Image (cartoon, helix red, strand yellow):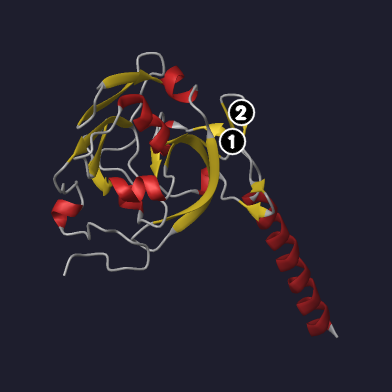
Amino acid sequence: MKRILLLTTLVLVIIIFSGCASEDQQKPGVYNNETETTFYEGQGLTPIAEQRNNAIKGTQYIERESYRLQVDGLVENPREFSYEEITALPRTSKIVDLDCVEGWGFTGKWTGVKIADLFEEVGVMESASTVIFYSADGYSTALELDYLLDNNIILAYKLNDVALPPDRGFPLQLVAESKYGYKWAKWIVRIELSDSEYRGYWEKRGYNDRADVGGPAFER
């Protein structure tokens, strides 16, 4: 009888603590007076506090007022965009999973501007085929122009309905759907249009340039 009572108590404790853990995981955070969304269109989102993060030089801190995004290379009208000019463009939101090549990942609601809309502002030349993204920490990566346009890829400035926290890439993070996380450039300060292939930080170190989720991590 005592053994049954002990087992019953143990099961109840496990259930209670499991319930608390599950509730904590869905507890939204508050960032600069914005409360994040952790459930959207019937789907649970990973709270920002539980999202893992990689960076080559740690978190970068960029001032909103002085920030400028330079877009140049094979474009008709090279220019710089302020944060306010970027957020004034038509916005779109998507639920997209970020999958790291290391095996972890998370689900987020990303809000930002379609790269196609940004490129309309500068006029992309017909010879352009590659888009290179440069980050404030010296990181870089590149993707095919057709991939970015055909998939309506966005530059996000919000995650789970709050402005990107510094460790998640403020002011802009590339939402490279179906690509491993090393293609998701953060703290983007420059975008260059090119007609040549480009190997970014991890690609130069042997990582697969296509970076398709589920595909090989390294070049063969």
Q: Kindly indicate whether the residue at mark 1 contacts the one at mark 2 (C-beta within 8 angstroms).
A: yes
- In the rendered image, residue 183, in percent from the top left (x then y), is placed at 31, 49
The residue at 35%/56% (across/down) is: 180
Amino acid type, label 1: Asp
Q: Which residue is mark 1?
A: 161
Identify the residue at horizontal 54%, vertical 45% (top origin). Answer: 94
Q: Is residue 178 above or below residue 85?
A: below
Q: Residue 157: in sight, yes or no?
A: no
Residue that numbered label 2 is attached to? 34
Tell me the SS state at disc 1.
loop
Q: Taking the image as drawn, is residue 38 in sight? A: yes
The x and y percentages for residue 189 are 29, 28
Residue 34 rendering spot, x and y as whole percentages: 61, 28
Neighbor class of circle 2 (other Cα within 10 Å; few <14, some 14-19, many 20+) is few
User: In which quadrant of the rendered image does the C terminus lie?
Assistant: bottom left
Q: Real-space Cα distance between discs 2 and 1?
A: 8 Å
Q: Is residue 72 left or right of residue 185?
A: left
Q: Residue at x 42, y 50 (%)?
A: 151
Q: Position of residue 49 (x, y in %)?
A: 53, 43
User: Are there few (<14), some (14-19), or many (20+) residues within 10 Å of tag 1?
Assistant: some
| Quarter-of-image position of residue 175 | top left
Answer left or right for 214 relative to 6. left
